[in-house]
Amino acid sequence: MSKNLVIIPTYNEKENVEKMIRKVFSLETPFELLIIEDNSPDGTAKIVKSLQKEFPERLHIHERKGKLGLGTAYIAGFEWALKRDYEYIFEMDCDFSHNPDDLEKLYKAALEGADVAIGSRYISGINVVNWPLGRVLMSYFASVYVRTITGMKVMDTTAGFKCYRRKVLETIDFCEIKLVGYGFQVEMKFTAYKFGFNIVEVPIVFVDRQEGTSKMSGGIFNEALWGVLKMKIRSWSRKYEMPE
């Protein structure tokens, strides 16, 4: 059993899922994969299950009844990982906007002391490919807004390409995580920050998906922006103490 688990939520990713699985398993570092499958009508789950015959010990699938949100997908994956002996838990997209080769960078950062390693689009300039200018500006200034509200020094506050050390996920009470869309990514970072965990950003290049359909929408960003303000207000009444 590998100590490294990569969690990938999927919904209608038949064009990408097999290529992603094979790419992750080709990397030098041994990773296992957990696919959180939200009952895709395009047959994504069937593809994953067929590949489990080829990778019976490394490829896992957790099926849900429907599209229940990004945050709940990752929490389901975190809970699955914590019941097993994984030390490093990664999260990434299935659409190759996150380069699987960069898993090695995140793993190296964790080995060197990061409690949360973030694949950052903005730590060394703006490294986004194939996004329209409006979306780049919306994403960049969303991170500026989050930094202003929360006080975090993280440049890419909405990043969804990350590695957590096990102790971070053991410390966070998932019942206290209220945001479910891309705001979930912000709330997880903010909670880790409030507990005093070491957060390190690793520069990556983010490339917009080439195949399949994007799940991004203005509503998702609105949830993140208004949700961040509510999250900050909630934090005033919470205690962030490391368990003994």
Image (tube, helix red, strand yellow):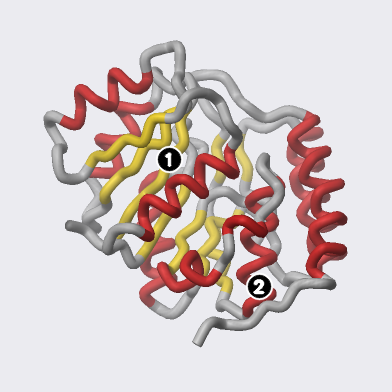
Image quadrant in which you'd find residue 87:
bottom left
Amino acid type at image mark 1: Ile
The residue under label 1 is 8
Amino acid type at image mark 2: Tyr
Q: How many marks?
A: 2
* Closer-to-camera residue (87/80): 80
> Spatial distance from mark 1 to mark 2, Cα to Cα?
23 Å
In the depicted structure, whether residue 216 falls above or below residue 229: above
Q: Residue furthest bottom?
A: 244
> Which badge, 1 or 2, comes first in the chain's sequence?
1
Secondary element under disc 2, as helix, strand or loop, is: helix
The residue under label 2 is 193
In the depicted structure, whether residue 203 falls above or below residue 129: below
> At 37% across and 20% down in the image, what residue appears?
44
* Closer-to-camera residue (206/4): 4
* Closer-to-camera residue (194/234): 234
Q: Which mark is residue 61?
A: none
> At 79% across and 68% down in the image, what residue appears?
235
In this rendering, would 199 be left or right of 78? right
Image coordinates of residue 224 in percent, x first then y, are 77, 45
In the depicted structure, whether residue 50 falls above or below residue 98: above
> At 70% across and 47% down in the image, what residue appears?
179
Image coordinates of residue 145 in percent, x first then y, are 85, 56
Image quadrant in which you'd find residue 26:
top left
> At 47% across and 19% down in the image, what residue appears?
12
